[in-house]
Image (cartoon, rainbow, N blue to C red):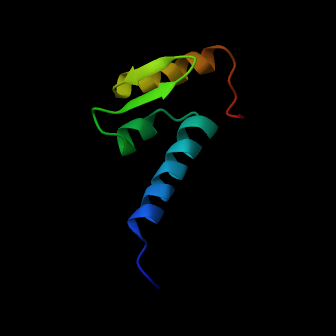
Amino acid sequence: MSELSQQERNRLIVAHFWEEFWTKGNPDVVDEVCSDSFTTFYPMHGQLIGKAAAKLMLAKFKLVGYNGRI
């Protein structure tokens, strides 16, 4: 069995994050795979800096009835 390329490892990490965070609504994945300086941008929320900001955004989605389906 051949070793995975860096690109494939990265793809698997992103797929794991997406599945856990968005589909399952699991905020713990942020601590698992994101650095302390994690930064992302969502048009409705703007730039989010840090793990706590990402977790708070997910909590807000859950408050309005987000069910993991995009």
Q: Residue furthest left?
A: 36
Quadrant for the C terminus in the image: top right
Query: How many numbered dots are placed on residues in this image?
Result: 0
Q: Residue at x 59, y 36 (%)?
A: 22
Q: Position of residue 40 (x, y in %)?
A: 43, 30
Q: Position of residue 58 (x, y in %)?
A: 53, 24
Q: Position of residue 15 (x, y in %)?
A: 54, 51
Q: Position of residue 19 (x, y in %)?
A: 58, 45
Q: Residue furthest bottom?
A: 1
Q: Is residue 59 left or right of residue 2?
A: right
Q: Residue at x 49, y 49 (%)?
A: 14
Answer with the quarter of the image where residue 37 lies: top left
Q: Residue at x 55, y 43 (%)?
A: 18
36 up-or-down from 63: above or below = below
24 up-or-down from 54: above or below = below
Q: Residue at x 48, y 18 (%)?
A: 46
9 up-or-down from 53: above or below = below
Residue situated in front as seen by the camera: 33 or 9: 9
Residue situated in front as seen by the camera: 1 or 24: 1
Residue situated in front as seen by the camera: 35 or 23: 35
